[in-house]
Every structure is written in structure tokens, then in C-alpha cells.
Image: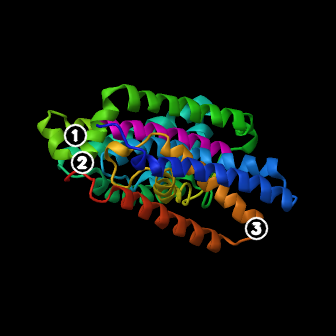
Amino acid sequence: MGKQTLKERIPAFASVLGLVILIAAYYVIGMIRDANVAYGLKAIVNQSVVVALVATGAVFIYTLGSFDISLGAATGVSALLGAMAYNATGSLLVMFLVCIGVALIIGFINSTLASVFNLPIFVTTVAMMSVLSAFMLILIGWNGTGDTIKVKARDVRPLDNIPFKVCVLVLYLALCWFIYTLLPTGREAKFIGGNPLCAKLSGIDEKRAAKIAAMISALGIGLGAFLTIVYAPTLNKDAAASIGMDVIIAIVFGGMPVSGGPRSRILSAVVGAFSMGFLSQIMTMLNLGSGYGQMIKAAIFILVVFIALGNQRGKLLTR
């Protein structure tokens, strides 16, 4: 992995600069509109932390040149089972452990199926998404109380605060940064994403790397599921449904190339997730409907991908 040139770092610089501009725009528009900036900032953190957690873990999978389309469904199932476990035991610790455990089991199943059938991770996750979505409906039916599974809001209120959520994100981000940057895991993933054939000839075990990536990603999913319950303790069949697409957009917003490989960055997920959060809140302050917000996000998404691909065109290693 050669040292990146200034030109190759443009997408990363642009993503950070974009986040800074959005933050500045948020405060300026907030003052002009006489909006409650502090309240809006709390909403941004609540919306962004879960996406950032799931996306940070997903960076390991995306670095391999693959992607996981079942992230939203996996988060939803983990949250539903965690909520059911809490209702059965009354223990927040049990709820936390169930969220993490279920996510790890799903990640293990995904990686094992991909390994056994010698398929890319994204192929197995497409099937898993359908299975998990159906399982969510079954769980709702088992609950027997209509179309939701509820945890009493007062029971999770002590954890529903910004310092706790930011602390969870920082600790997980630090763990992922350590593994991704200082251990061979990250370097091997970048090598595989850049040129899987070369990586294989160099003795790197692609299946092992995929399993590690899936389990690290699953930990982020479990943490995201736990905070989903804390923030919105009434869950239905659409719980965390948008996370899958939000993760893709967040990673691209953060300046990470869609092809993965050596130019991938662990911080892209956090930068992208909070960029989306500030953009959404700005749209709200400007009284733009969700439709306009989605169109603006789509336009920016396409622009970022175009810039990233334009910068890398002709430089990608043969895949």
C-alpha cells in the first residue's frame, strides 16, 4: 500500500470539509430561523449515532470490496429480541447481551454461508435480508400485543442521553480504529479489496478476513440495536428498516470509495453519518418536506460517487 498522494486524498478532505460546512450552515440557519439549535443538535446525535455504529463496523466489509444489504434487518431483529428479553427479565444487562449476541449469531451465519458455498458476502446477505425481515414479522406475532413490541420508556430513560450514546460510539470507534489501523486485519482487508488475486497469491486467507469483518460489523449492529431500543422503545416491523441504505450513503458521504480497497478509511462512516444528520436537520429547519430531503441526498450521493470514481478512474487494481 503506497502512500496516498494529495490528489488521492481529495475525497477524504472534501468529506470532512463538507461536514464542517454543514455544521456551520446548521448554526447560521438556526440563528436566522430562531430555531432551538440545542434541541436540534440532540436530534442529530440521536439519529446519527446508530447509523455511525453500524456503518463503522460495515467499513470492514466494504473494504473487502463487498457489501452487506441485511444490516437494517439484522439491527431490527436484534432490537426486537433484545426488547423481548428485557420484558421477560427486567434486566437492561440481559437486553444488551441479547442484542449483541443475536447480532453476532447473524454475522456468523452470514460469513459461514459465504464460506461454505464459496459466495461473496453480499450474495448471502441478500437472502438473509429476506429471512430476517420475515422473522421480524414472526416476532411481532409472537409478542401477541398487536403490531409492536414495547419497552417502558421510563426503564431506559437513564440511558437515553447524549453523553452515554457518544461514549458508546467513541469506544467502538476506538476499537475498530485499533483493529483496522494497527493490526494486520485492516491491511489484509485493503489488500483483498484492492486486488483479491494478488492477496490470495500472497497467502492472505480471504474467507478468514471475511469472517472477521462480519463479526466486527455484527458488534456494531448489536450496539446499534441496543441504542435503537433506548431511543425508541416502541418497536414495530419497520424498526431500523432504513439503516441499510443509510449506511451505504454515510460511507460514500464520508469519502470512502465504493470499490473498497486501499483508499478505505475507518472514519468515513462517522463523518458520513453525521453529515447526513446535519443535512436532514437543515432540511427540517428550512421546512422542506422529506421528499425534497431525499432528492437532495440522492443528488449529493451521486456527486460524491462521481468525484470519487473520477479521481480513481484508471488507478484501480485489476479485480
Q: Quadrant of the N terminus?
A: top left
Could you tell me what secondary structure mostly forms the magenta stretch? helix
Residue 72 is one of the magenta-drawn residues: no
On screen, residue 126 above or below 190: below
* Nearer to me, 223 or 42: 42
Instruction: Estimate the spatial distance between the alpha carbons at disc 2 and disc 3, rounded to whole Å.
Output: 45 Å
Dot 3 corresponds to which residue?
A: 286
Q: Residue at x 88, y 58 (%)?
A: 34
Residue 175 lies left or right of residue 123; in this view the side is right
Instruction: Estimate the spatial distance between the alpha carbons at disc 1 and disc 3, rounded to whole Å.
Output: 48 Å
Three-letter amino acid code at the position of disc 1? Lys
Dot 2 corresponds to which residue?
A: 114
Dot 1 corresponds to which residue?
A: 207
- Give the label, 1 or 3, closer to the camera: 3
For the record, the magenta segment spans 212-232
The single residue placed furthest to the front in the displayed view is 6
Q: Residue at x 28, y 46 (%)?
A: 193
Colour convention of the picture: rainbow
